[in-house]
């Protein structure tokens, strides 16, 4: 008989495997997350982690071309982190749009508190300028980060998200394979304690954001 911990870890790894190819058609080899998660009713959009993630130690470049220390700049603030790329045809823009729509339903003070950080998985094409332009169409207050790929990949791995180097397909398109999870970090502990998959809707985020801003469990 498998222990509950083993079963939960396997379940989470399966989720990661499903979402890794969200922005591409081939099977990637990126690392899968092995975090343990709490059992929750199917109606819950977010998955509470039994063992929260430490915020990634990432120093990258923001959309203004300036150094951005993720831990320092988001310390003590409710933060959502997502790894994706601007040329993604579906999941990435939908995910950011859903978060943007939900954020607008918060009181102004809570909107100002919430930090939404989008880290590119395709830094060669996602320059600070192009990333900034893309994010402004979603929400002008979203933070976009770019830098060298090994640093980004290592940062993603720290929170259980696998990403592969972008590659060119036979038809000439460039595909970036990456985990499609959004991870929420508590303003109380700076730990990543809730995970959202690619199927999370704007309504789901709308229900959870007020609690996430407070560092509560949704």
Image: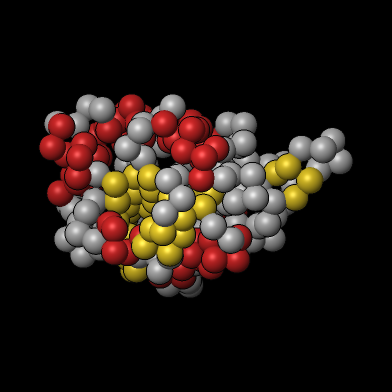
Whether residue 6 appears in this view of the structure is yes
User: Where's residue 71, x and y in %?
Assistant: 32, 64
Q: Which residue lies furthest to the front in this view?
A: 65
Vertical arrangement, residue 186 with respect to residue 89, above or below: below
Residue at figure coordinates x 43%, y 65% from the top left: 58
User: Where's residue 191, x and y in %?
Assistant: 28, 64
Give the image's coloring scheme: secondary structure
Observer-nearest of 80 and 5: 80
Residue at figure coordinates x 18%, y 53% from the top left: 215
Observer-nearest of 77 and 12: 77
Q: Which residue lies furthest to the right in this view?
A: 170
Is 89 placed left or right of 58 in the picture? Answer: right
Is 18 placed left or right of 145 in the picture? Answer: right
Is 168 placed left or right of 7 in the picture? Answer: right
User: Where's residue 96, x and y in %?
Assistant: 43, 35
Observer-nearest of 158 and 66: 66
Q: Report which quarter residue 63 is drawn in.
A: top left
Q: Report which quarter residue 8 is drawn in.
A: bottom left
Residue at figure coordinates x 51%, y 45% from the top left: 128
Query: Number of callouts in the render?
Result: 0
Whether residue 47 appears in this view of the structure is no
User: Where's residue 18, x and y in %?
Assistant: 59, 48
Residue at figure coordinates x 82%, y 38% from the top left: 172
């Amino acid at each position: 008989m498998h222990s509950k911990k083993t079963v939960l870890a396997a379940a989470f790894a399966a989720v990661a495997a499903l979402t890794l190819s969200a922005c591409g058609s081939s099977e990637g080899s990126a690392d899968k997350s092995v975090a343990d998660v709490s059992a929750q009713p199917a109606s819950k959009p977010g998955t509470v982690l039994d063992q929260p993630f430490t915020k990634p130690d990432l120093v990258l470049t923001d959309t203004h071309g300036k150094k951005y220390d993720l831990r320092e700049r988001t310390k003590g603030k409710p933060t959502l982190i997502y790894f994706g790329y601007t040329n993604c045809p579906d999941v990435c823009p939908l995910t950011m749009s859903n978060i943007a729509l939900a954020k607008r339903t918060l009181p102004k003070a809570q909107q100002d508190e919430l930090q939404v950080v989008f880290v590119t998985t395709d830094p060669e094409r996602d320059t600070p300028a192009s990333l900034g332009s893309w994010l402004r169409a979603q929400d002008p207050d979203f933070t976009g980060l770019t830098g060298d790929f090994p640093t980004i990949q290592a940062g993603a791995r720290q929170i259980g998200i696998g990403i592969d180097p972008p590659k060119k397909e036979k038809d000439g398109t460039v595909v970036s394979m990456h985990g499609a999870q959004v991870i929420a970090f508590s303003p109380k502990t700076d730990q990543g304690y809730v995970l959202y998959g690619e199927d999370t809707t704007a309504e789901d985020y709308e229900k959870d954001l007020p609690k996430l801003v407070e560092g509560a469990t949704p």
